[in-house]
Amino acid sequence: MRIANLSGRLALIVDGRAVDVAKASDGRFSADPQAVYEHWDEFRSWAAAADLPAGASFDPAELGSPAPGPRQTLAIGLNYRDHASESGFAAPEGLPPVFTKFVTSISGPVTQVKLPADGSTDWEVELVAVIGRRAEGVAEADAWEHVAGLAAGQDISERVAQLAGPAPQFSIGKSYPGFAPIGPWLVTPDEFDDPDDLELRCAVNGEEVQKGRTRDLIFSVPALIAALSAVLPLLPGDVIFTGTPAGVGLGRNPQRFLAAGDELVSTVEGIGELRQTFIA
Ligand code: ZN
């Protein structure tokens, strides 16, 4: 099953067309895309059995984030060995660094993003998981039961702000408006042959800069849910950015950052793509 946020309303995506959930369910489920995660099991049962009307075609630019207003966004740093290495760090042995992307940075999949002045703005394609069932002290073996679905994400990062000061400011450098595109929709885990092995790719102006697979995550999605939920409850609709593979601009020689007019396309296998253009 695929769900989307089409112009601020929850939609099911069926054969590439959008079915409005509030209308198709006669108001049983809210049009608010973020509200569905509070009733995720009930929604899944309804969607599996519902006799849905024909969907409508849409423009991907009309899509918002399938989780536009999570109470918590947890983002993971240095979760691929090759990216930890290019960043000058040893691969973490315990839980990798955790930071947040503040909720106002979240956007839909096709956007224009304003580059911070005097900054060095970088790309990080990531798999995003959205929580569908409260997770508190969850064992790794049970963790997928708590995931509503997966989406593509971009952890856009302004490196000057991120790395200035006596200690890194990950949450600040990664939370400018539009720095957390998510989408193009949410795909439930059952849709994948193996939800723990998906290819991630990222290209700048058509040139591939990142290519990795989620099987190389140091902490997989289930391992992250186990480790994070041992500390704090993960709530329905919460978002986890799982980390990026190698190939970011900061790790290149010479370093490379985004410029006005650049187009960034980020893809996750079995899900779809994000498309960001940058302006000064
Ligand atoms: Zn990241």
Image (cartoon, helix red, strand yellow):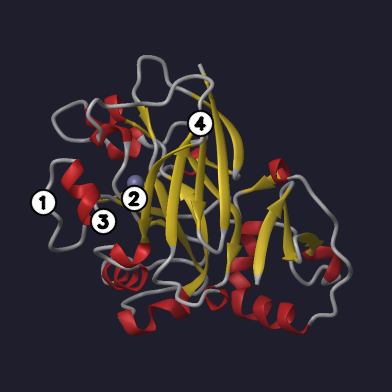
Q: Residue 41 got which mark?
A: none
- Hey, what amino acid is under mark 3? Asn
Location of mark 1 (residue): 90
Gap between marks 4 and 2 measured at Cα: 19 Å
- Hey, what amino acid is under mark 2? Thr
Ligand 1 within 8 Å, label 3 CB: no
Gap between marks 4 and 3 measured at Cα: 26 Å
* Label 1 SS: loop
Asked if residue 52 shows in the view, the reply is yes
Asked if residue 30 shows in the view, the reply is no
Ligand 1 within 8 Å, label 4 CB: no
* Label 4 SS: loop
Camera-near label (4 vs 3) is: 4
Of label 4 and label 2, which has the lower sequence position? 4
Where, quadrant-wise, is the N terminus in this rendering? Answer: bottom right
Report whether 178 appears left or right of 30: left
Q: Quadrant of residue 196?
A: bottom left
- Hey, what amino acid is under mark 4? Asn
The percent position of residue 187, horizontal first and vertical second, equals: 58, 66
Assess whether mark 3 and mark 1 are in contact (beta carbons under 8 angstroms): no
Location of mark 2 (residue): 244
* 81 over 12 or under it: above or below: above
Ligand 1 within 8 Å, label 2 CB: yes
